[in-house]
Image (cartoon, rainbow, N blue to C red):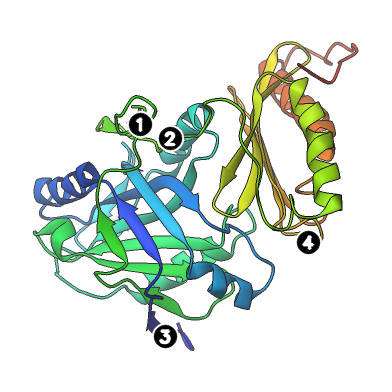
């Protein structure tokens, strides 16, 4: 793309990758020597996920940690040739939603694909344009996109790694000091976290300790050191106490509320409210997901996005919309839907 240049990543940026992921990456290439392969990275972010200005995003890169715990496979309907790769998007979305129900903080961190059939060592213009479109999309939950390129049969050992940033015409290549292949933080039992599955290959998802062992001590600059922030946190603690499925979490310099509420006594709704970086800013994020036969997800940025009280009110409208979509899908030919009252989120 015209005006795009590759630059070096900040030295302090860290991307942690699980050893088993690197093995899967390499084995996928070895198992398919004649076609391009790939997958969608999933994991967790430690640091500032969203900022309003590009200079703030560049500053966030200096403190950014990406914990890449696994990838979702291409899927059964992937399109793969010696010169082209496109995953089965519907399958990958379904797999991500399944993981998200269990780990509400999980993120789509990026993707990888290979050029090993032709051993081209560079991203194509189409690759660059596609990654830029993804990171700039409003529905992408954070400001970064981590991309890996497998270039030959050595797999992960010879792969190149890049970071794309929202609103940045440049993209950044990781060096050896940025990339760390290691097991993640130890969980409460001394193991490497909980186990799950990502993709049809049954890869293990080792999740960093979610920090749910008792009350979370909140000590976050911009919040606990200001009267406005302390008042807001006290009000939100009272709200959380009414909902057994919600909890405060602290990740690096940001506070969030995450978990599930039950709407109308029967519909589970996953809620993630990322507080702004301070009580006086508007760089929060609200994410509401209603899963089922018809999944509905709403993400919101702006001045109300980090407001827990507003988020709980929004749940009612979003869940009602999801219920209406599900009802219409089941009764397309059964006449008009029955009318009846609905109640809001219940603890």
Q: Residue at x 74, y 27 (%)?
A: 240
Q: Residue at x 35, y 31 (%)?
A: 193
Marks 1 and 2 close (CB-CB < 8 Å):
yes
Marks 1 and 4 close (CB-CB < 8 Å):
no
For mark 4, what is the residue? Answer: 281
User: Residue 106: where, in percent of width, then height?
Assistant: 49, 40
Query: How far, Cα to Cα, is label 3 from label 1?
Result: 38 Å
User: Residue 109: where, in percent of width, then height?
Assistant: 44, 52
Look at the picture and state if 79 lies above or below 309: below
- Is 258 displayed left or right of 325 in the figure? left
Q: In this orientation, which residue lies closer to the viewer: 334 or 202?
A: 202
What quarter of the picture does the C terminus occupy? top right
For mark 2, what is the residue? Answer: 209
Classed neighbour count for the residue bearing mark 2: other residues with Cα under 10 Å, few (<14), some (14–19), many (≥20): some
Classed neighbour count for the residue bearing mark 1: other residues with Cα under 10 Å, few (<14), some (14–19), many (≥20): some
For mark 1, what is the residue? Answer: 193
**Secondary element at image label 2:** loop
Query: How far, Cα to Cα, is label 1 from label 4?
Result: 34 Å
Q: Which is closer to the viewer, label 3 or label 2? A: 2
Query: How far, Cα to Cα, is label 1 from label 2?
Result: 6 Å
Q: Earlier in the sequence, mark 3 or mark 2?
A: 3
- Is 130 displayed left or right of 14 in the figure? right
Q: Earlier in the sequence, mark 1 or mark 4?
A: 1
Marks 3 and 2 close (CB-CB < 8 Å):
no
User: Residue 50: where, in percent of width, then height?
Assistant: 62, 60
């Amino acid at each position: 793309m015209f005006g795009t240049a590759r630059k070096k990543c900040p030295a302090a940026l860290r991307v942690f990758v699980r050893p088993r992921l690197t093995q899967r990456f390499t084995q996928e290439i070895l198992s398919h020597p004649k076609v391009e392969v790939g997958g969608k990275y999933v994991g967790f972010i430690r640091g500032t996920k969203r900022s309003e200005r590009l200079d703030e995003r560049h500053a966030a890169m200096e403190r950014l940690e990406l914990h890449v715990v696994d990838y979702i496979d291409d899927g059964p309907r992937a399109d793969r040739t010696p010169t082209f790769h496109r995953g089965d998007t519907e399958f990958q979305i379904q797999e991500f939603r399944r993981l998200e129900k269990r780990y509400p903080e999980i993120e789509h961190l990026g993707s990888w694909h290979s050029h090993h059939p032709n051993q081209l060592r560079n991203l194509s213009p189409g690759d660059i344009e596609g990654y830029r479109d993804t990171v700039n999309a409003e529905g992408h939950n954070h400001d970064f996109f981590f991309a890996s390129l497998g270039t030959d049969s050595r797999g992960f050992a010879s792969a190149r790694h890049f970071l794309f940033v929202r609103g940045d015409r440049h993209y950044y290549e990781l060096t050896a000091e940025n990339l760390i292949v290691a097991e993640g933080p130890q969980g409460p039992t001394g193991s490497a976290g909980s186990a799950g599955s990502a993709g049809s290959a049954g890869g293990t998802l080792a999740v960093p300790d979610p920090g749910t062992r008792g009350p979370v001590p909140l000590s976050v600059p911009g919040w606990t050191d200001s009267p406005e922030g302390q008042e807001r946190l006290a009000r939100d603690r009272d709200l959380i106490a009414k909902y057994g499925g919600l909890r405060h979490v602290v990740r690096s310099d940001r506070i969030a509320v995450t978990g599930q509420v039950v709407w109308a006594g029967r519909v589970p709704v996953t809620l993630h409210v990322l507080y702004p970086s301070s009580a006086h800013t508007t760089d929060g994020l609200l994410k509401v997901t209603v899963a089922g036969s018809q999944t509905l997800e709403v993400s919101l940025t702006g001045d109300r996005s980090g407001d827990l009280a507003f988020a709980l009110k929004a749940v009612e409208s979003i869940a009602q919309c999801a219920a209406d979509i599900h009802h219409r899908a089941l009764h397309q030919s059964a006449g008009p839907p029955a009318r009846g009252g609905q109640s809001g989120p219940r603890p």
